[in-house]
Amino acid sequence: MNKNRRSTKRRRGALAAAILLTAVLAPLSRAAVKQGTIEFMMGGYHVSEPRFTAVYKEGGAVRGLILSSMLVRNFNFYLEIKYFQKTGLLTYTQEKSDFYLLPISLGVRYILPFGLLHPYAGAGGDFYLYYEKNPIGNVLNYTTGLHALGGVYVQFGKLPIFLNLRVKLTTARAEEQGKTLQLGGWEYGAGLAVSF
């Protein structure tokens, strides 16, 4: 019984400390939230499809631009336009093969401003335009998909500049010659965002 009282006191103390910390940091966070952001990002992208990794090996670099706009308090609409390119060797003939991917994502995320840290989580839809070129033939096609993402913005003092650290999982199935390919996968990256 004595143990339960101590445990209850600790929980109450932790809760009181969390409320106090939030009250102290909230004014800082309100000042940091603006109407929107423009962001330049770089990271890695790993296509989940085993047939893709057989030709192109591991994932590669992805670069892009992210635009966002505040919808209502703490809810943010975003548009991502990125570029991914890989060169590999065909599995049987060992001839060169090039793959180009232009993923476009639209979604909504919830941002929790907390002092200089702004963690967020979101989800949305994707449009993947892709092109593959090799001696067997050329393919230009598109597919759609869904994604979920999470990350944190880190603010540089009172400046409207943020470092964005994020991870994203996408599922985007394409069909080529009667075969289904998973062009989605894990993406991780960092970006530099300017809030306005």
Image: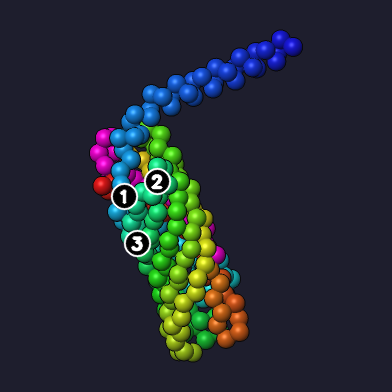
> Which residue of the protein is positioned furthest toward the front in this rendering?
72
In this rendering, the label closer to the viewer, 2 or 3: 2
Helix, strand or loop at disc 3? Answer: strand
Q: Secondary structure at mark 2?
A: strand
- Asked whether 158 or 44 is in front, the reply is 158
Relative placement, left or right, of 173 versus 106 is right
Q: Which mark is residue 72?
A: 2
Q: Closer to the camera: disc 3 or disc 1?
A: 1
Frontmost residue, 117 versus 95: 117
Q: Earlier in the sequence, mark 1 or mark 2?
A: 1
C-alpha separation, residue under disc 1 versus residue under disc 2: 11 Å
* Magenta residues (range): 156-171
Q: Residue 36 shows which numbered tag? A: 1
Does residue 164 show up magenta in the picture? yes
Q: Check disc 3 and report the residue beneath it.
A: 64
Quarter of the rendering containing residue 4: top right
Horizontal and vertical percent position of residue 149: 49, 53
**Which amino acid lies under the numbered mark 1 shown in the image of this protein?**
Gly
Of 43 and 163, nearer the camera is: 163
Element marked by disc 1: strand
Residue for point 40% across, 54% down: 77
Instruction: Report the quarter where the N terminus lies.
Output: top right
User: Which class describes the residues within 10 Å of circle 3: few (<14), some (14-19), or many (20+)?
Assistant: some
Residue 192 seen in the figure: no
Give whichever of discs 3 and 1 has the lower sequence position.
1
- Seen in the picture, residue 129 relative to 151 is either above or below; the reply is below
Q: Residues within 10 Å of mark 1 (few under 14, many from 20)?
A: some
Distance between mark 3 and mark 1 Cα atoms? 17 Å
The image quadrant that residue 29 belongs to is top left
Residue in the foreground of this view, choosing between 55 and 117: 117
Q: Earlier in the sequence, mark 2 or mark 3?
A: 3
